[in-house]
Every structure is written in C-alpha cells, then in structure tokens.
Image: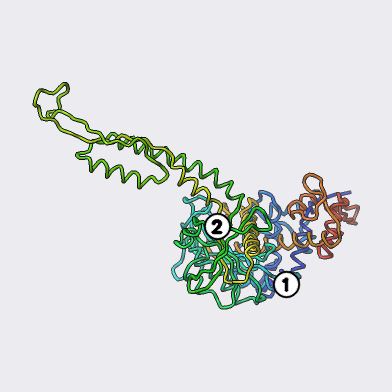
Amino acid sequence: MFVTTRSLDHHGIVSGIYDELEIGKVIDEVLPKFGQHKLAHSIVVKAMILNCLGFVDSRLYMYSQYFETLPVERLLGSGISASDLTDDVLGRTLDEIYEADSTQLFMQLALKMMEIVNIKTQLLQCDTTNFSVYGDYNHIDGSSAIEITYGHAKDGRDDLQRFGLGIITNQYGIPLFAKAYSGNASDKETIIEAMKMLQENITFPDDVYYIADSALYSDNNIKSMRKGMKWITRVPSTLNLSKDLLISDLEFKQGEDPRYSFYETIVEYGDIKQKWVVVHSSEMQKRKDVTFEKKIKRILKEAQKDLKDLKKIEFACEEDARAALERWKNGNPYCLLETVEISTVSTRENGKRGRPKKDEKLIVHYVVNAKAVRNEEITLNEKEHQGRFIIASNDLNLDAEKMLDYYKNQSKVEKGFRFIKDKSFRVSEVYLKKPQRIEALSMVMVLTLMVYSVAEWKLRERLKETGETIPDQVKKQTQKPTLKWAFMLMREITEVKMKVDSKVVTQIANMDEVKGKIIRLMGKNCEKYYF
C-alpha cells in the first residue's frame, strides 16, 4: 500500500469563493489562452491568490515549492501539478494582465462580484498608500506603465524606490477599485482620479457617499467633484478657517456616544456650500494630552537654554537688550518671564583686569537678567482644544453623528492596506524585472483582498442568519470571527491518497465539528473541495 498526504487546510474555502465570484470566468473572457501554454491565466491567478492567502512566509515567486505540499489537482484541476507553476508561467500571466489594462480588468471583476454578492453599497471609502521595492526599474520614455521611483515614503524607507496603490472599498472593506500609481504620484491627484474612474465605470445609488481623508480636501478637488457626488472628508487643520475654528470657544452638543460632542456650521469652500462638523473626541483628548505635555516640556527646556545664551550677551545699549528680550518672548509664547532686569556691566577700555584708575574711561554694556516659567494660561487654553478635528460634507442635511460614523468607517480601507502589507505578500522583496508586472501584481494583491473580504463577510452573515457560533481565540463563542482565525481553525485538514494494487482511494482526514460547520456555512462552492 502506498500512501500520500497533502495539506488542504483552508485552501478549499479560498478556491470555493474564487469559483463563486466567477473570477476565473471573467479572466478567461478577457485573457483567453493561446498557444501551447498548459495553464489558463485564470488558473494561474487562482494559484497566486491561494499562495497569497497561505499566510506563510512563502514568497510570491516560489510557486513550485509552495504547492508541493498541497492537493494541487483538487484545488486547480485535473492533470495540474506543482511543477507547472513556474516563474515563466507567472510572468506571462502578469504580462497579459497588464496588456489588458489591470484597472479595467479589476472593475469588471468587481462588477461581477456585485452581481453575485447581495450587498447594497452605501459607502465608498477611498485611500492611497505606497510600497517599497528592491531592485532597479528602468522607465521607458513614452511608456504608459507606472514609474518605480523615489517619493514620499509612508513606511519610512526613503532609501528605496516605490510604487503607489489606490483602493476604493465598500462599507465592508470589499474592494471595488484598484489602480497602481508611480512612486512619486500626489495623493491629492490620485484620490480624485480614482473616484472619477470608479463613477465612470460603475453605477451606484444616489445615496452613496465617497469618503476620504484630508488628501481629498483641496480647492481644485472640491470643484472637480461631479454633480450629485456626495462626499465626506476630513478638513486639513492647516487651512486658516479650520485653524480659527479649532481654537474657538464653541458650544458643543453631546452625542449619543458619550465619547464625542459636536459643533455644526455651514461654510463655503471651493465655491461649494458644505457642512463642517467640529468633533471633540474625549479619547483623542486623552492621547493628545500626553503628547502635548511632552511637547511643552521640550519647548520649555529649549526656551530656557536660549534664554541662558541670551543672558551671556553684552549689548551696547539698553534698547538693544530690550529688543532682544522682546524677540525671545515672541518666539516662545508658551513661556513667561519673571524677575526681568536690564543691568549694566562696566569694563576697562584696555581690557585689563582689576580696579580701574581714577578718572579712567570705562565701557558700559547692558545685560539681561530674567527667569522663564511655563505660561499656564496659554498652555491650558491650547490643551483645552486638543482632541478636536473637522469633517465636512456637501450633504447639508446629513446628521453630525451619522457623518462621523460614516467617516470612521474609513478604517475599513486602511485595514485592507494592512492586509496587503502582510508579510505573506513579501511586497518589499518582490523583484519582477519591470514596472508592468508590478502594476499587474498590485491588481492581483487587491483581488486577493476581495476574495478574503467577501469570504469573511459571508461567514459572518451566515453565522448571524443561522444563529450559530464558532470559538474565538480564547474559546468564547462568536458570530464575528476574522477569516484569518477561521482559517487557523481549519489547519490539519488533509487529503490522503492510498494506493492498494491499482486502486486509488482518496479520503479527507482530520475533519471535526467546527471545521465541518465552517465549510457548510460557506456553501456548496466550498463544500465540493472537502467532500
């Protein structure tokens, strides 16, 4: 008897959701297979997503090694083996994705997903980030490909070149738009471009809101918003109008959530009438109080050092001494001066030391003597205004608390970026030879996020509908598990093949009640990979 085992684990769930969303069908229509290539591009993309969602330290280009322990035929199709998934196969598929326009391909996949998954889009959350990469990438003049170059490093790696990525998700964090950008692209420009491209290609209900951080809020962007587009964004604190509002004495209204209070006003900016809501967050206040105290202590220490240096200077006249003291006061508003005194110091003209002779001419200098202390009035006043920020919307009828609730949902797209930057992707170590493949890879990364997000949403919805639960990390029952934890619960599910004489028997081992429940809840497209 000959026995082989392969780790099935959660990969059947990934494959099932891939099939349910008809991703392979759309890819085969857009990227038909030509020539003698054994694998369709849809199979290669499925393999890439399985690799990405393996949550291991396997690099994207290590396909053969990664799939050697998996039941490849069960997951990808009859006659397919791990050795078929080579670097060349991956490269050809990425090239075809780029040639087909990866952004348009993703939107076609998003449209198909929206047809299949019954979710009403209420919020469209827009954000951008960038990724550092190793290696040299030469941009060809005239090429429409992104440029891998130096730009603002959001990860602090100014020594590395990078590319940008813009994503728009719905309120559940499911991506509907993805586009790669050059590493030096401006967030203010890319975020409005992404919003416009999405609106041109996918029709949404009139009551949908586009949500973004302060990168969206500029005079040009506000003016260029299409008529009928409802938006919510954070107002930069650098605007003069917002600066004044943030330190004004305002009458706040307590929200239903005791952590927040609100002040509403109507303003006009970018020729657009809009509602501004000044939000005070007690939790933000606590966090900022700590950093504010550290800031004041540092400023006071530096101011006292500057004053000590000032006290060493000998001025030619009293007016010069007082002018220097005034300049110090203007530059240090967080400090007050105590025991201020301008005194004189006389020295002998020839520079000699000792008691001067009778009627000897002396040189008179003026010096400052003062002590700096903390200006409690100013610091307390500024401290009182910590924890404030401003959000804005062109929907003048939108309730302040609802506006904040919608804006806070922006964390879903930020969560998506954290997912994509997970070490499983190894983005910073991927060297794909040319920018075109990086651009195509970024689409696959966001497509992976789509599969993951839909699967997580579906599992939670099915648990809620059925009233069932699964154990969380501390063995408490939950209806809101992360999909990654559900995947952890499915470890050790194994495909066992036993060959006795010429007969091959295949069985699934290490199944238990919780694993079976998860598979059943995920539906028939997932069940077929396990039973």
Looking at the image, can residue 166 be seen? no
The mark closer to the camera, 2 or 1, is 2
Q: Is residue 35 above or below residue 367?
A: below
Q: Mark 1 and mark 2 in contact (Cβ < 8 Å)?
A: no
The front one of 59 and 192 is 192
Instruction: Write the residue at 69% across / 75% down.
Output: 29
How far apart are labels 2 and 1 at the CA level? 46 Å
Residue 153: image x %, image y %? 50, 54
Residue 205: image x %, image y %? 67, 76
Residue 517: image x %, image y %? 86, 56
- Residue hosting label 1: 25
Say which quarter of the image contains residue 465: bottom right
Q: Amino acid at mark 2?
A: Phe
Numbered mark located on residue 399 in the image = none
SS for dot 1: helix
Looking at the image, can residue 212 be seen? yes
Instruction: Write the residue at 69% across / 49% down.
Output: 56
Q: Amino acid at mark 1?
A: Lys
| Figure quadrant of the C terminus | bottom right
- Residue hosting label 2: 389
Residue 471: image x %, image y %? 82, 49
Say which quarter of the image contains residue 332: top left
Q: Is residue 262 left or right of residue 26?
A: left
